[in-house]
Image: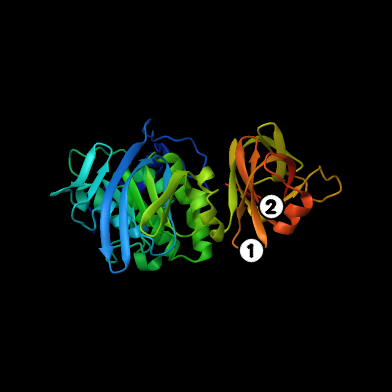
Amino acid sequence: MTVPGTQHLNNQATTSSWWQRLSWTSSAKPNTQTRRTAPASKEPKALTVALQLQRGAFRLQLNDSLPLQGVTALFGRSGCGKTTLLRAIAGLDRHPNATVAFGEHNWQQGRHFVLVHQRRIGMVFQESSLLPHLSVQQNLLYGFNRLGKDCERRLVPEQVIALLELEPLLHQQPEQLSGGQRQRIALGRALLRQPQLLLLDEPLASLDQQSRNDILPYLQRIASQSGIPMILVSHQLDDVVKLADQLVLMQDGCIHSQGPLQQQLLQPELAASGALSLLHAKSLGSKDHLLQLRIGQQQLQLPAPKHSQPSYRLRIQARDVALSSKPITDSSVSNQLQVRITGFHPAPHPAETLVQLQLEGQPLQALLTQQSVQRLGLQIGQLVYAQVKAVALD
């Protein structure tokens, strides 16, 4: 059976011609730093939400405005209200006296309520929810073929198929796919709805670790290339750090804090999830299979990845940073960086302390025992040397 609008995909004779016309290129492994071809808005659109909800002992109370640009993560413990907020934004749940507005679009206020299918949003949940009686190709085009005549089609099927590397799967049925493949189809279907906002509710939660690792680069690729603002709900800090630009920390039904991810990672409330830092570094090339990176006026080196990029995001666990009052010359740790101490915070374990540092204007954290802090005589404002034992690249 042919779904209207899919003839150009079914015609194998024209495959090479439409593939050559793609404005996004596909590679063996997604390159998350590929040049953005779908321009993002110069000014971030604000999402305004005012909502009060009481369910038993749980109370959700919000009156906030979130500037959306890139990926905004809603993060917090299970039951803090993340998914409830996302469903209100989507229009899946209608709450009395709520206000929801996205940019110039007023989705809910008083009796005014825009239905979910009229909100120009794409949604991906824990489960892919593909239609089992349709092929992958037909699932992808299900929403695309139902768009109104006035809807601008910024993304066409060929682009999304290339972006998510779906061509080998087009004629398969959902039951033939792995969990990660089904989520890629769900992402493609959401993108082809031409959304102005993409909502992701724990999209990796139902996947095993290998599938999570497989799909993360595709999410990074969507974020870097599509220009569509995204809201990601997650309680896994590792996923958030790999994907997000902004972080909204939720606690007990309220937004505790919001801001750029790099700064939000300093929140003491995140220490229980594993204190870490996010640094931005520029590449100086490779030498002897080691990637040379520059942060401000200082350099560090790491095993070179297979695919080079002009810049990188570095993820550093606080427990992988040691401090010394002087440079150490007889150590196997090759990366030593001069930093300044800016503060101390309690760690989850009473014997430990989180030391806040500044590295060339960027925040860095080190997890030390209180005994080490006292032995070294560490003080706010002091210049010390950070030995970085392990780094993850994005």
Residue 49 position, x and y percent, is 29, 47
The amino acid on which the numbered mark 2 sits, given as a three-letter code, is Ala
Q: Quadrant of residue 172?
A: bottom left
The amino acid on which the numbered mark 1 sits, given as a three-letter code, is Pro
Say which of 87 and 98 sits in front.
Answer: 98
Task: Give the number of the mark in front: 2 or 1.
Answer: 1
What is the number of the mark on residue 29? none
Q: Which SS class for mark 1? A: loop
Left/right placement of residue 255 relative to residue 245 reads left
Q: Residues within 10 Å of mark 2 (few under 14, many from 20)?
A: some
Residue 51 position, x and y percent, is 26, 52
Q: Residue at x 43, y 40 (%)?
A: 225
Q: Which residue is mark 2?
A: 390
Q: Which SS class for mark 2? A: loop
Residue 21 position, x and y percent, is 39, 36
Q: Residues within 10 Å of mark 1 (few under 14, many from 20)?
A: few
**Mark 2 vs 1: CB contact within 8 A:** no
Q: Which residue is mark 1?
A: 350
Would residue 206 be visible to someone looking at this image? Answer: yes
Tell me: residue 82, above or below residue 161. below
Tell me: residue 258, above or below residue 298. below
The alpha-carbon separation of the residues under discs 2 and 1 comes to: 24 Å
Tell me: residue 106, above or below residue 234. above
Say which of 151 and 311 sits in front.
Answer: 311
Of callouts 2 and 1, the N-terminal one = 1
Quadrant including the N terminus: bottom left
Q: Quadrant of residue 95?
A: bottom left
Q: Residue at x 66, y 59 (%)?
A: 352
